[in-house]
Image (tube, grey):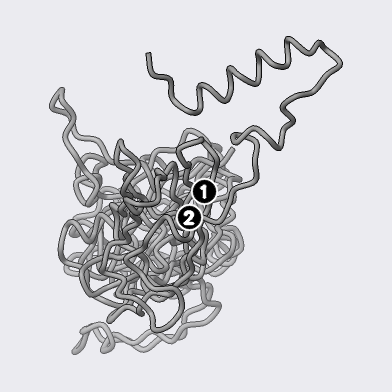
């Protein structure tokens, strides 16, 4: 029987050590090829990229080969970019070739480490550094809202500075948008259009939790000519669970904090022809004073108005507010006389203003008006059921039992 050189080396060393006794040493650590420091394998392996010089084409796969005359095999290859991202690759069973299986990042510096083994089992190593060409087009993501404290209904938004239409490219983008959530929270991204993506959980955010979002797209290839750029992360501190229920039929508003009713306020909502929209709305902001003019929202003629308004809490971009309306106190609690806003006394409006936060929930029911749209007029995201919301993810895929699931690779629970 013919033995391999490595087997002879190990067996011979063991027998000799046994024959010399416990106190003798015949083969020290430096004599065992497996424990030796890696030698320079520069002459035994070859790259299809060039050390130094001009940047190499990032669209070209990286390839490492063992030279036939070198008598070595490749045991491992690692290629890491300047951000610490590892380039995926595949090594042949014979150890004679390794090639990358994903595209290299654009405009970055790679460090490649190749580990080898010669016929005696001695380890070798070769390193290469090179830079890749910059992307022809970069995609920048701007997250919203800004860092700060918000209510349990606040969606996370991602605005892209370039349109992304292809589903495969959208999937790359979505995987790179990582949301760190409280444990047990299920959520998903939804593509509003080619440049806007929203993230919300299945249910409202847990009160007093922390939610953050970041992008891992920097340098990542999104499409043939587009790579990701760096983006600023955002962290939200979620406050109390505040839910406001505005009943247009009973003409009263119920204010709940963490499941407990803490105030009931007589109100007036939109009159026929100007009825307040039904549905869930998210508070967009607050202003102590707003000058409200009917002609700015298309209301003219005998219905036109020009009023100073105080304690104004905004819930739609089209101009729907919850605010002080001292001119309609006689109707509050009895009938709807506004042009779509929810009006209350100045004292009640001041209390509401002090106790409401951006991101809190304001829901209108029993109005004869239209329904609040999911997108385009504020944050109506919660008016879309969860099944339809998940359909807007580019990562939706069917399971074997026929149900659909969303790839949660970019949703990371906070522990």
Contact between marks 2 and 1 (CB within 8 A): the answer is yes
| CA distance for labels 2 and 1 | 6 Å
Q: Residues within 10 Å of mark 2 (few under 14, many from 20)?
A: many
Identify the secondary structure beneath mark 2. Answer: loop
Question: In front: 392, or 155?
Answer: 392
Q: Which residue is mark 2?
A: 360
Rendered residue at 34%/54% (across/down) = 67
Which image quarter: residue 130?
A: bottom left
Question: In front: 42, or 195?
Answer: 42
Q: Is 403 placed left or right of 94 in the picture?
A: left
2 or 1: tag closer to the N-terminus: 1
Residue 37 image point, x, y percent: 65, 46
Rendered residue at 52%/48% (across/down) = 242
Q: Which residue is mark 1?
A: 242
Identify the secondary structure beneath mark 1. Answer: strand
- Looking at the rendered image, the quarter that the C terminus falls into is top right
Vertical placement of residue 176 versus 258, above or below: below
């Amino acid at each position: 029987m013919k033995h391999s050189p490595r087997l002879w080396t190990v067996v011979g060393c063991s027998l000799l050590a046994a024959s010399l006794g416990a106190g003798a040493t015949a083969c020290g650590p430096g004599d065992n090829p497996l424990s030796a420091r890696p030698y320079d394998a520069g002459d035994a392996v070859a790259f299809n990229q060039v050390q130094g010089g001009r940047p190499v084409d990032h669209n070209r796969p990286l390839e490492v080969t063992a030279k036939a005359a070198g008598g070595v095999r490749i045991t491992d290859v690692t290629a890491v970019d300047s951000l610490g991202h590892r380039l995926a690759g595949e090594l042949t069973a014979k150890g004679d070739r390794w090639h990358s299986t994903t595209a290299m990042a654009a405009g970055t510096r790679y460090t490649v480490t190749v580990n080898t083994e010669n016929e005696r089992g001695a380890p070798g190593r070769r390193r290469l550094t090179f830079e890749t060409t910059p992307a022809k087009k970069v995609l920048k993501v701007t997250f919203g809202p800004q860092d700060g404290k918000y209510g349990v209904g606040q969606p996370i938004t991602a605005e892209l500075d370039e349109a992304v239409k292809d589903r495969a490219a959208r999937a790359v983008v979505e995987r790179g948008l990582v949301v760190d959530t409280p444990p047990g929270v299920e959520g998903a991204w939804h593509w509003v259009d080619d440049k806007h993506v929203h993230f919300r959980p299945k249910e409202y955010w847990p009160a007093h939790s922390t939610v953050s979002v970041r992008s891992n797209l920097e340098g990542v290839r999104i499409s043939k000519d587009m790579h990701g750029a760096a983006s600023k992360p955002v962290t939200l501190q979620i406050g109390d669970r505040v839910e406001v229920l505005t009943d247009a039929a009973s003409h009263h508003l119920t204010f709940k904090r963490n499941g407990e009713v803490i105030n009931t306020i007589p109100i007036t909502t939109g009159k026929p022809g100007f009825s307040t929209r039904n549905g869930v709305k998210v508070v967009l902001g607050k202003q102590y004073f707003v000058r409200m003019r009917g002609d700015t929202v298309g209301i003219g003629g005998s219905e036109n108005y020009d009023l100073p308004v105080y304690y104004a809490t905004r819930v739609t971009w089209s101009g729907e507010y919850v605010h002080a309306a001292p001119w309609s106190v006689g109707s509050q609690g009895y009938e709807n006389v506004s042009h779509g806003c929810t009006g209350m006394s100045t004292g009640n409006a001041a209390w509401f203003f002090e106790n409401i936060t951006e991101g809190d929930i304001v829901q209108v029911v029993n109005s004869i008006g239209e329904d609040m749209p999911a997108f385009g007029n504020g944050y109506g995201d919660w008016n879309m059921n969860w099944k339809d919301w998940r359909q807007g993810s580019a990562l939706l895929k069917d399971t074997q039992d026929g149900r659909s699931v969303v790839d949660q690779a970019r949703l990371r629970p906070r522990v």
